[in-house]
Image (cartoon, rainbow, N blue to C red):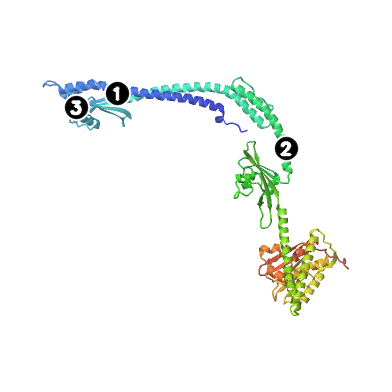
Amino acid sequence: MQKVGFFRSIHVKFVLIYVMLILIAMQIIGLYFARELEETLKENFTTSIEDRMNLIEFSVREEILKERSEDDPTLEQSLRIVLSGFTSDDINEIRVVNPKYRILATSVLDNQSMVGQRSMDDIVRRSISSEAPYNNTYLDQASQERILVYAVPVLYGDEVLGALHVKSNIEIVYKQIEEINHILAGGTAVSLTITIIVGIFIAQTMTKPISDMRRQAQAMAKGNFSRKVHVYGDDELGQLAIAFNHLTSQLEESHSTTESERRKLASILANMTDGVIATDRRGRVSLINDSALSMLRTSRELVLNRPISNVLGVDQVYTFEDLAEVKDSIVLDFSTEQRPYILRATLSVTQRETGFVNGLIVVLHDNTEQEKIDMERREFVSNVSHELRTPLTTMRSYLEALAEGAWKNEEIAPSFLHVTQTETERMIRLVNDLLKLSRMDSQDYDLNKEWVEFSYFFNAIIDRFEFSKSQNVHFQRVFPSEDLFVEIDTDKMTQVIDNIISNALKYSPDGGNIRFRIKPLNEMIEVSISDDGMGIPKENVKRIFERFYRADRARSRALGGTGLGLAISKEMIKAHGGEIWAESEEGKGTTISFTLPFVQQEEGEWD
């Protein structure tokens, strides 16, 4: 089992959760306290400024309304004296502005040059025009401190005598709040340190039994059921440890039983010739034996956990639910142009007692040979029936004509009898060829072998055809100069060569060539017979040795062929220990070649 990372362990998670809860609680309390403290300090600061502004407003109004003699100070001087009495650390500047927005006085000595100038502050204009107080807080770009600006109208009845413009340093309040926040942060840090220490101690008492059970689970996963979990107490964790130890004992017994059954099942599956595939309830392959892997021509890694319909190659037709409902076996055709390959899949659903589908069992059987035999049997019966029916139909037609009185006609009666005789001989040849193939299929070759010099033997057969040929075809021979002795059944080999030469003559055009060649190899001789006929399509070249196959069915039947000559030739060459094959190009002719074993001639051996 993979080792648990530090930050993934329940011990660390417990401490972190504990600390986070405390931290969240303290943050909520701190935020609430800081917000309330900030509001209170700001409210107290604003109230303090407003109270002093009421006093300043009263004094300024008295000075403005006061009747002055020539000996009394001017209004500006009186107002400056009044304002200087209200300066403090939290008030930066106090200005008195008349209703025409002219500055009458200021409490800052450095700003005395502004007296008599027009005030450009919007808050002062709004206060005078609306006869109501206004305040605003902004950040001073020079000192980077927050400034609270207050504008209060100086009223006398319904008359506006002017306005007070006060700038106060509210940054003092924010500095107090920052100091308090630092105190809260320090307290939070101390509290968290104590919380972490306490949390670690509590977590250890709770996670130690869990760690023991984890180690026991790891040992159980490796097959060790002898280890027991220590019981630390009678609480919920202690009860869990007792139940875990009981579970260990039960699992040990179940594991022994399951392992025994698993070995039996593995032995059965490994020795089965049929392929077996099992799926889970979602239709994904969970088990497959070697026979099934061999049949599907794949590896275990590529099959496991894949959908069964995809593994069988039927995902375009069946889903897993469809396969679960299939009653009959399914034919899986993996055939290629070069080789047929057919499997039969029998499916069975595994269910629980409640009827819930638990998976699917698929048994694969290689049905290639059986299908091939059935196909060949059907084709053979069809071909034999067709080949026999054709002459029988012809004979019946002519015999019916003769029976109806045609035998009395001396001109057509002999012709009808000749056709009937020809078709009868054709049927006899067909039956004889079938008997020969039947004996060969049962390995009853009945060979009477003798040693012959093959060039001489081959020449004699070619001379016979050359002497009796009725068409304008030229024979060309390429034979080696040395003697080539082979052990053959001369009758059967003559039949083979006759079949090949007959076919070459049938399909050779007028004025064409037939080439005969003998080529000695290491322990074989290669015999080739080539013509300039119409040739065979490339996809059909390998089929000319099949029974009843004809490259040109209409012409072959018209020439009296049964379609068994090359099939018989193949079996006879095979019986002699050789091979036979064909090479052809459509429109350019065909070459039939075969090999025969021969013995190198020793000096004086055949004298």
Q: Where in the figure is residue 319, as x and y percent of width and height?
A: 60, 46
Q: Name the residue under label 2.
A: 263
**Image vertical order of residue 460 relative to residue 79, above or below:** below
Q: Which of 594 and 564 is in front in this view?
A: 564
**What residue does disc 3 label?**
162
Residue 375: % across, % down? 71, 57
Closer to the camera in the image, 394 or 606 = 394
Q: Distance between the residues labelled 2 and 3?
A: 107 Å
Quadrant of the frame with the C terminus = bottom right
Pointer 2 local density, CA inside 10 Å: few below 14, some 14–19, many at least 20: few
Q: What residue type is labelled 2?
A: Arg
* Residue 555 picture quarter: bottom right
- Residue visible at 50% across and 21% down? 194
The total of numbered circles placed on residues is: 3
Left or right position of 114 against 547? left
Q: Position of residue 567 (x, y in %)?
A: 75, 63
Determine which quarter of the picture holds residue 143: top left
Residue ID for mark 1: 46
Residue at point 61% right, 26% down? 211
